[in-house]
Image (cartoon, grey):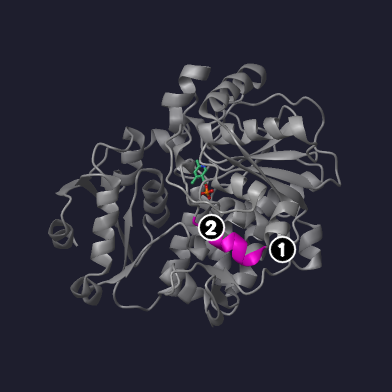
Amino acid sequence: MRYFSTRNKAEGVSFARAALTGLAPDGGLFVPEVIPPYPEPVKSSLGTMDFHDIALETIKPYVQGEIPHPVLEDLVLAAYPFTAPLIPVGDRLVLELFHGPTAAFKDFGARFMARAFAYLRRGEEKPLHILVATSGDTGGAVAAGFYGVEGINVTVLYPQGRVSPLQERQIAGLEGNIKALAVEGSFDDCQRLVKTAFSDENLQKRKALSSANSINIARLIPQSIYYAAAAGKAFAGKTDPPLQESSPWAACGAGVQEKPIPVPGQAITFCVPSGNFGNLTAGMYAMKMGAPIRGFIAATNVNKTIPDYLLSGLYEPRSSQATISNAMDVGAPSNFERMTAQWSLEELRRVLQGVWVHDEATRKIIREVHKTQGYFLDPHTGVAWQGCNQLRRSCSLGVPVGVLATAHPAKFAEIVEPLTGQVPVPPSLKQLREPVAQIIPADISALLEVL
Ligand SMILES: *Cc1c(COP(=O)(O)O)cnc(C)c1O
């Protein structure tokens, strides 16, 4: 498979090149030259296939000729010791994506990317050094994703005192090949330091540097897996049993099923809580590959650049506003460029409906779903659930509706618990160790010295 920059369709590169460089040299994002359809036998058995087999079939065509089949098999087994259950709650299906080590869906992308990097750089003498600045969430997923992966070292910069205690333990509780630097400054300072380090010629000579940016194609592709698996299941009329609190994965309330859903033979509509729109783009890839998906609802908080775009046809990026679903506080979604490079506005409108939700409505729905269904929503999942409700009033949605649960509510206990009472804490979050970070001033010489 060749990959092209969204800004230059003339010159293709390999998967390895696209993955290891992240951003194209012209500033564009890498997109595959085609979105490969599932072979017919795969397409018709998505509902009964094992998660790892779906992972394999989904990723295979994108890395053909670069990652051999047996290696890819080992890779997906190592990346995904957890799955993505589809749980009936009320008249919805919830796709729980928070059973990985950081209790958020970014584990699916980060864990594959880390292992793919390690394989693609096999035999290289210098270890790869990943430098990443985080305002909180990405750092945890990247650190956990690369933790223990041979041949790769990671340095995460975060603003000291400006991430939550839980986030700090996720970023700085790992050690080993992960180094955490608490910067005496803001997130912008952290980003500036990373950028300056990347342009330091001396450092470039000494080290093989890379970023693990969220726009990396190697993070995007594996996010299609759970869409295909869930759509296949729903089409076959199946769901998963809710996880019990005693299970090794976190239960999040059992939910009450109102009627037997889904009815077999119906394609699902996914409601996706969105920020940078990587998750939603991956869903559109899964649909294009042939997974039985009817369409998508793009749900945002007040940072509603894309819902506005779908209505008006005008793309107007803006600066972001802070909300309780802070992983979606994005005013200029980076994957917009990828979506519009692959689909016209008309095509997008055919499969995508936009909706946006106020914090107050999000709080209200978290309270209500817990009260009526016994199920805990995190603020991001709350946006998606409420977004569905708002659309249901103005237009009919396809049945069944799948809501993507992108984080475990215990990660946002300070917001959720005042609305619901105590949230069960998943083992992955209980086991986090105390943070061990080196504190550095917001100064490039301090960073270079550490590196
Ligand atoms: C990152 C994140 C999102 C947004 O995903 P995008 O791919 O950026 O649209 C939603 N929810 C949670 C919990 C996240 O961490």
Disc 2 marks which residue? 335
Say whether residue 342 is magenta: yes
Q: Is residue 286 magenta?
A: no
Mark 1 or 2: in front is 2
Per the image, the residue denoted by label 1 is: 289
Badge 1 marks a residue whose secondary structure is helix
Q: Earlier in the sequence, mark 1 or mark 2?
A: 1
Q: Is residue 290 left or right of residue 189?
A: right
Q: Amino acid at mark 2?
A: Asn
Name which residue lies at 74% across and 56% down: 291
Q: Secondary structure at mark 2?
A: loop
The amino acid beneath tag 1 is Met
For the image, the number of numbered tags is 2
Report x, y in % for residue 303: 51, 41
Range of residues picked out in magenta: 334-343
**Residue closest to the eye, 351 or 106:** 351
The one of 105 and 301 positioned closer to us in this rendering? 301
Q: Is residue 255 visible?
A: yes
- Picture disc at residue 45: none
Figure quadrant of residue 38: bottom right
- Label 1 crowding class (10 Å Cα cut-off): few <14, some 14-19, many 20+? some
Q: Residue at x 36, y 49 (%)?
A: 139
